[in-house]
Image: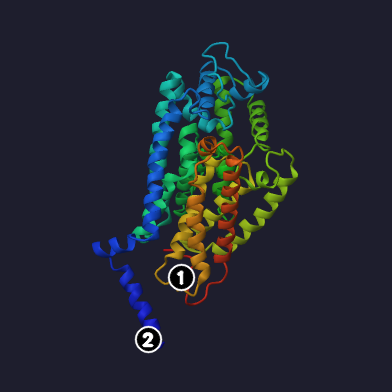
Amino acid sequence: MAHQPRQLALISRMARFKTGASRTVKFVGPIGILTIALGLVALASLVRVIFNTLHETGAVDFHPYWYAGHAVRSGIDPYTFYLDSFRLPRLPHGPDPVPRLSVTPANSPSLLLLLTPFSYLPWPGAKLLWMFVNIALVCILPWAILAVARVRPPTRVKLLFIAGSYSLLASRVLVGNGQTSAVVFLLLLASFWLATKGRVLATSVALGVATAKISLALPVYLWLILSRRYRAALVAVSIQLAFFVVLSAILRSNPLRMVHSYSAIVLEHIGNDGIHLGGLVRWGDPGVAPHVLAFGLLVLVAIATGRVLRAGLRGEFITFGALSVWGLLAGYHGVYDGIAALPLILSCLCVAHHPRTRPSLRRFQLAGVAATATLVIHSVPGVFLGERLGLEWWDLGVRVGVSVSLLTLLLVALVLAAPASKDGPPQAAPC
């Protein structure tokens, strides 16, 4: 027993000794098998999203931007026009909306203006081009998260994280539906990285544009406040408001009315089904109470996490990840926004596989189990499999599983936020 610490130190050094043989041995096992399985799911998902996009109802969530682009080019405020036309708008000049596709302009002018050039293409070409853009963004996402986190996890953990990122139900729904979550979350990552570099204006520009999806951007604002970067948050809000002014100037419309119309559209989404905790408590109920309870509970969780983990760049990254998961649970989110859980998943995987993690520290092992289980649960097929099995409850079950796994992951992060023992890995340096 006296030699046990020395033996553990030797094993730790051997685990960090990188040779081709050692990497091969480490990859063979449960993690390697799971990585291969998730990689195969990712490849199958790629084929499916291409067919989904080519279908007549493909890119359903991108259609509003394409159609709103025609409205902007016609000099029409798309938000007010949508509300005034009883939700079935037909432009006086321009194409009719594609049947069975959404026309709701749910994001603010910063993204609407960015995507307006797609309206110069016919609908089939526009949605195909956006699909390729989204595929490229999804491919970049895990590498961007690894770069921003500044971690060097073991090769097997890195491959598991990348394969899991590509296999997520969020990734394939995001691409197949033509969502904007990938570009928004990459902008949020950029704003986090720029903030840690002290670049206030660049941080505010990236965050200001990303605020087009306010539900995804809200946790970053909270992180800026917790880290006392108030100026960056205020400038970001000002930039987002400036986009309303610019669009209203282009269209010669009332900016206040445009903001009011946009706010009304956002409020319509509060009662929608999703992966948020309010939807889990009373699925599909538009009542305010479940959302208030969920929001109040998770604000406390977020503040507690921020206070403990706000130390050093890597500690701030863990806080950023925890608040991103909190945001997924606190406000309305579709399954496609699940990519926001990836930073916290990476942090938990790194903590679990840290070279100085001892087997006796089960809370660190719990982090790895929670992160791996989240990747697996979030990779389970949704509507497609439910239709093939003839199970009407399958889609609801998948969304409940996603919500519960996110809540579990967040609670595990709080456990890790407890003061570490002197033998454990440092909390501010997960890898």
The residue positioned 50% from the left and 34% from the top of the image is 179
In front: 319, or 344?
344
Q: Is residue 253 above or below residue 152?
A: above
- Mark 2 sits on what residue? 3
Tag 1: amino acid: Pro
Please determine whether, in this image, residue 158 is positioned above or below residue 416.
Answer: above
Most distant residue in the front direction: 390
User: Residue most toward the bottom?
Assistant: 2
Query: Callout 2 environment at 10 Å: few (<14), some (14 to 19), or many (20+)?
Result: few
Q: Quadrant of residue 160?
A: bottom left
The x, y position of residue 298, in whole percent, is: 65, 54
Determine which quarter of the picture holds residue 234: top right
- SS class, disc 1: loop
Label 2 element class: loop
Circle 1 residue: 425
In this rendering, would 206 be left or right of 6?
A: right
Considering every residue shown, the one lying at the far left of the view is: 20
Asked whether 110 or 158 is in front, the reply is 158
Residue 157 in view in this figure = yes
Location of the N terminus (image quadrant): bottom left
Q: Position of residue 399 (x, y in %)?
A: 58, 44
Write the residue at 70% across / 45% down. 291
Upstream in sequence: badge 2 or badge 1: 2
x and y percentages locating residue 17 in the rendered image: 28, 68
In this rendered view, identify the residue nearer to me: 189 or 41. Answer: 41
Vertical relation: 350 (above or below) 39: below
Where in the figure is residue 237, as x and y percent of width and height? 58, 41
